[in-house]
Image (tube, rainbow, N blue to C red):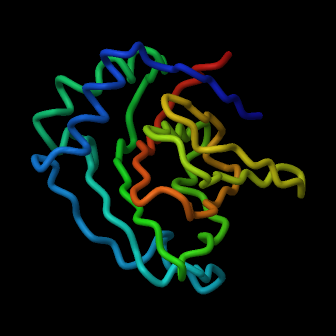
Amino acid sequence: MYKVIDNFLNVEDYNNIYNFLKSEDTPWYFQNHDVVREKSVTSLNKNGFFNFCFYNNYSPSHQYFYTLMPPLIEKLNVQAIIQIRANLVFRDKDSIESAYHNDYKYKDSYTGIYFLNTCNAKTVLKIDNNEIAVDSTKNRMLLFPCKILHKVIYQTDLHKRYLLNINFFGEPWQ
């Protein structure tokens, strides 16, 4: 149903992605809400977050897609990309957690959350009414079908949390 893979990328590929996202060259975009607003979804995050897409709307969104994403795509054995998005979340006393949500609802699609730094944030999966918490650990990949609801419990220890959110077609852990 889900899989956690530590030390997902080699050190060089990990550092290339992480250093780019921490640099002043990354065009971060502010988002008011951490999940798509639906009538049934209410988020407790009042502060928003920043994101940046490497791939969106059926095509690469930035030149660094071609240099930074191939190792990740190959290791995941991606058949088709839906979206690859970087998230930057700042620590804040008002941000507690997001609402449960799905990134996409395509049949046979998968979500990968690639944690780029270690902090006390958690991604929580809701599987058969059980909550499974996965720690945000540097160079860790969390994989699960897009149909699984998930939420984030925000960090209180580290000022900035970086991650990649990869939505795709394929079955990398089979």
State whether residue 19 is above or below residue 35.
Answer: above
For residue 40, which quarter of the picture?
bottom right
Q: Nearer the viewer, residue 104 or 131?
A: 131
**In the shown orientation, is residue 43 left or right of residue 32?**
right
Q: Residue at x 35, y 42 (%)?
A: 84
**In the shown orientation, is residue 98 left or right of residue 17?**
right
For residue 136, which quarter of the picture?
top right
Quadrant of the drawing holding the N terminus: top right
Q: Residue at x 54, y 79 (%)?
A: 93
Give percent across and percent down for residue 3: 70, 29
State whether residue 150 is above or below residue 38.
Answer: above
Q: Nearer the viewer, residue 170 or 139?
A: 139
Number of on-image labels:
0
Give percent across and percent down for residue 95: 54, 76
Give percent across and percent down for residue 68: 24, 26
**In the shown orientation, is residue 40 left or right of residue 117?**
right
Q: Residue at x 26, y 53 (%)?
A: 52
For the view shown, which residue lies furthest in the front direction? 157
**In the shown orientation, is residue 25 left or right of residue 69?**
left
State whether residue 67 is above or below residue 156.
Answer: above
For the view shown, which residue lies furthest in the right direction? 129
Q: Residue at x 53, y 25 (%)?
A: 170
Quadrant of the drawing holding the C terminus: top right
State whether residue 134 is above or below residue 48.
Answer: above
Q: Nearer the viewer, residue 27 or 41?
A: 27
